[in-house]
Every structure is written in C-alpha cells, then in structure tokens.
Image: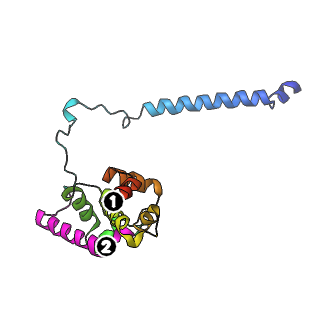
Amino acid sequence: TIHHVFNMFSWIFCTHGLTLSLSAFIILIGYFGLKQKEIFVNFTEAENQFVTEERAKYSGSAMDDEEAVQYVIRLKAFMSSKKPYLDPDLSLPGLASSIGIPTHFLSRVINEQLGVNFFDFVNHYRVEEVKARIVDPAFNYLSILGIAFECGFNTKSTFNRVFKKMTGLTPKEFREQSEN
C-alpha cells in the first residue's frame, strides 16, 4: 500500500493527471462557449444590408470649390516664396500649420485639386529646384547628390528614383543634356 501512495506523487501520475485535467477544462470551455446565444446569432437575409454605392472620400469635410481654389493659390504662393520643400523633414501637418490651413483640407486640396499625393507634390518642387541648380553655374562646386540633399531629399536612392520618374532622365543624363 505504501508503494501505491508514493506512486501517486510520481512524475508520470502527475503529468497524466495534468493532461486529463486540461482536457476536461478545454471540453467544458467549448461546451459552455457553444451554448452562448450571443455568439451564434442567426441572421435572416432580410436583416442584411448591402452597401451598393461608394461613400465619397471627403464627405465629412465641408469645403466648397471657391475655398479649395483659394487654398491652392495660397499653397502655391507659399511653396514658391518660402520654399519649405528644402526642409527634408517637411510633413503635411507642418506645411498646413505654416500656411494656416487645416491639415485635412490641405490634404484634400493636394489630392483633389492638384491630382497628386503630398509626397509627389513636394518632390515635384524638389526636382524642379534640383534641375534649376544643376544648370546654374553658381552650384558647380556641388555634386548632383550634394544639390539633391540641399533641395530636401534624404537619400540618394529616393532622389534618383523620383528624379527619373519625373523627368524621364537620370540626374547625370540631365546634367549632360543641359551642358550640350
């Protein structure tokens, strides 16, 4: 009998007991989980509502066309005069606060009125600035990459990709073409 008592505390007995207990626990959780009415509610087809028309992207923001045109004018004037695109850390909220336009309105104006996203909009100005500096003899002391960094680009790969996308030429090809 002492052998049976000590056998109850053996490793095999404990692991088998633990396995049995966990199995019973999982079965009970499954049983009571399936009995919950809130989990498996039967919906009839009549209650289903299908959305058939797409919701407008900016339907929550009230901005008329005249106001949008004024924002475009302010934005372009600010970009030309202050050249905020030269800052490599320029962001949509930063630009919006500098101009005094709510961020969501500025995003909407750039997307809808100008037909581009924020990054393409800013990179367009940066590429134009790079092009102007490449042909300007006053910037001959800088490499093309140096000019790109001064114009707000953060990395060589981004600069090369964006420049090629917007001009159809690599920066080196552009410089060679402008020298001829």
x, y percent for residue 124: 31, 60
Give left or right: position of 18 versus 47. right
Give left or right: position of 107 versus 70. right
x, y percent for residue 77: 23, 72
Give left or right: position of 166 versus 50. right
Quarter occupied by residue 174: bottom left
Q: Main secondary structure of the magenta part?
A: helix
**Mark drawn on residue 101:** none
x, y percent for residue 24: 59, 29
**Foreground: 108 or 159?**
159
- Where the C terminus falls, by quadrant? bottom left
Report crowding for label 1: few under 14, some 14 to 19, many 20 or more residues within 10 A (C-alpha): few
- The residue where tag 2 is placed is 97
**Mark drawn on residue 178:** 1
State which region is magenta: 60-86
Residue at screen point 20% across, 61% down: 61
Give left or right: position of 15 versus 167. right
**Foreground: 64 or 98?**
98
Amino acid found under the numbered disc labelled 2? Ser
Amino acid found under the numbered disc labelled 1? Ser
Residue found farthest to the right: 2
